[in-house]
Image (cartoon, rainbow, N blue to C red):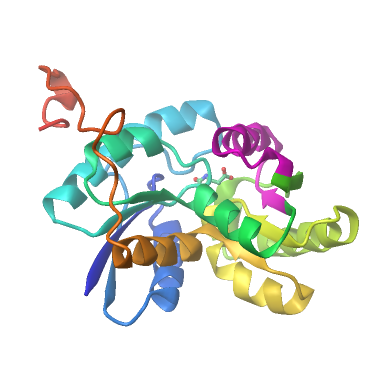
Amino acid sequence: SLCIQLINPNTSLGMTEVMAATARKVASPGTEILAVCPEEGAPSIEGHFDEAIATLGVLQQVKAGREASVDGHIIACFGDPGLLAARELARAPVVGIAEAAMHMATLVATRFSIVTTLPRTLVIARHLLHQYGFERHCAALHAIDLPVLSLDDGSGMAQQKVREQCIKAKQNDGSGAIVLGCGGMADLAQELTLELGIPVIDGVSAAVRLIESLHALRLTTSKFGDLDYPLPKPLSGRFADLNN
Ligand SMILES: O=C(O)C[C@H]1NC(=O)NC1=O
């Protein structure tokens, strides 16, 4: 059986639980989901500054996961913060929810749209499209213009906005699929797929199954070249034990 570490890079336990529940629903029998988040950091990640803060916590959790011999790590934040640094530390596969959802979207549609939270984080999704080589696959990006934690406030308002933006994207973008651009939207994909009649893809679910596939194919992070373990050197202070 497999153990997959689900890392919520923000410190909001409610979001961790929503993502863990979605991951457990889609995981194969025998796959265990170990849901974690950093002990300290940002309650939500809404920009470059928050991502920089979150990266240390992601790396600390990846190290803990490696020591627990997990079979894979999911970075469950749509900016995929610390993805390549995490791959240097890890032995097992590391998959970000943005890359996972984008890859799946390219397998079922020629173009996809992204629906995320704040307009200021749209550029982060654009940077990822460029980094992953998916710019020409993405027809449009939209924001619900509500903060990440509005998805966790129990009002259902953010969820309604996500639904509205997905309907508009289907009508206007010429996309065949929609990628949900926030880990906190993980529980909305199944219902929206049924309602809209097009694939609405959540990166948490996509990442769980991608890691299961990598494991089945005996594929783990290449430790040859730039993703080899970090060069040994005396790190100081809070970083002291991060690389050993
Ligand atoms: O960028 C976003 O809107 C979403 C991103 N921020 C966060 O705290 N978890 C996420 O998935």
* Left or right position of 89 against 193: left
Is residue 198 visible in the rendered image? The answer is yes
* Left or right position of 140 against 159: right
Is 126 a magenta residue?
yes
**Relative to 80, does residue 102 appear above or below in the rendering?**
below
**In-front residue for pair 60/228:** 228
**Relative to 26, does residue 62 appear above or below in the rendering?**
above
**Relative to 126, does residue 97 appear above or below in the rendering?**
below
Is 175 a magenta residue?
no
**In-front residue for pair 208/210:** 210
**Relative to 104, does residue 131 appear above or below in the rendering?**
above
Residue at x 48%, y 43% (from the top left corner): 44
Q: Main secondary structure of the magenta part?
A: helix
| Image quadrant occupied by the N terminus | bottom left
| Image quadrant occupied by the C terminus | top left
On the image, the x and y values in percent for residue 76 come to 43, 52
Is residue 153 visible in the rendered image? The answer is no
Residue at x 30%, y 63% (from the top left corner): 215
Give residue 212's quadrant in the image: bottom left
**In-front residue for pair 193/37:** 193
On the image, the x and y values in percent for residue 55 come to 36, 34
On the image, the x and y values in percent for residue 82 come to 38, 35
Residue at x 27%, y 60% (from the top left corner): 218
Magenta segment boundaries in residue numbering = 113-136
Residue situated furthest bottom in the rendering: 29
Residue at x 12%, y 25% (from the top left corner): 240
On the image, the x and y values in percent for residue 176 come to 77, 62
Residue situated furthest right in the rendering: 172
* Left or right position of 10 against 170: left
Q: Total of numbered circles in the picture?
A: 0
